[in-house]
Image (cartoon, helix red, strand yellow):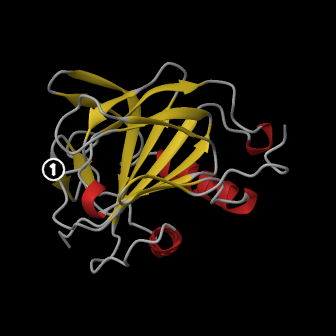
Amino acid sequence: MSDTLFPRERNEIAPGAVHLPDWLGDDRQRALLDACRAWAGPPAGLRTVRLRGGIMSVRQMSLGLHWYPYGYARTACDGDGAPVKPFPAWLGTWALRAVADAGLPAPADPYDVALVNFYAAGARMGMHRDSDERSPAPVVSFSLGDSCVFRFGNTESRARPWTDVPLRGGDAFVFGGPARLAFHGVPRTRPGTAPPRLGLTGRLNVTVRASGLT
């Protein structure tokens, strides 16, 4: 059955956590993908991230400030050492609109950082929480390409209870308020599910945050 006939509805997964299906239309998906491709190249482009327990299967880069385990810097200190690429104002505007569409209060702090994550086939993201920012502003996530299972948990631990949310290319997900520090992750993607019209193999996720550091 077609999603055009049966569109997916806005869904509150937990208080403060809202899934906005198909929030990015084709034009904005293409614009975001073109931007990601430009950002991904050196200097301070996509890199492999080393954690205390091993290497992330997801490749990552930052805008505005560089995230590294477990803090922020102005240069790609665990990559090529180059200054981080600037955070674009239009991406902050998109994030504010998504927050409004999710029905959450507008944040007091400006959106100023973003993490771009690339999932090739077989890549995953373990349960974690976004706790390196000083601002309580909602986190806004935009998805492109392959579908994935987005596991949204609780604020106490990585264990259950959690909810598995299917995210597709074009979806947005917003979490703030009581859900701001919830554990979340991507246990699997669905390779080959990206819309052919986009020309993307794999999954891109752009997570926009207010650092409270600038």
Quadrant placement of the C terminus: bottom left
The residue nearer to you, when weighing 121 against 7, is 7
Q: Position of residue 24 (x, y in %)?
A: 64, 59
- How dense is the environment of label 1, judged by Cα within 10 Å: few (below 14), some, or many (20 and up)? few
The quadrant in which the N terminus is found is top right
Residue 152 is situated, as x and y percent measured from the top left of the image, at: 37, 40
Please state if 64 lies on the left or on the right of 89 as rendered: left
Residue plotted at (33% across, 69% down): 112
Judge whether 15 appears above or below 61 on screen: below
Q: Give residue 59's quadrant in the image.
A: top left
Mark 1: amino acid: Gly
Residue positioned 20% across, 29% down in the render: 51
Residue that appears at 21% across and 45% down: 155
> Total label count?
1
Horizontal and vertical percent position of residue 165 = 50, 38
Against 169, residue 139 (above or below) is below
Residue 157 is situated, as x and y percent measured from the top left of the image, at 18, 35
- Up-down: is 147 above or below 40? above
Task: Report which residue position mark 1 lands on.
Answer: 71
Residue 160 occupies which quadrant of the picture?
A: top left
Horizontal side, residue 211 vs residue 167: left or right: left
Q: Nearer the viewer, residue 149 or 44?
A: 149
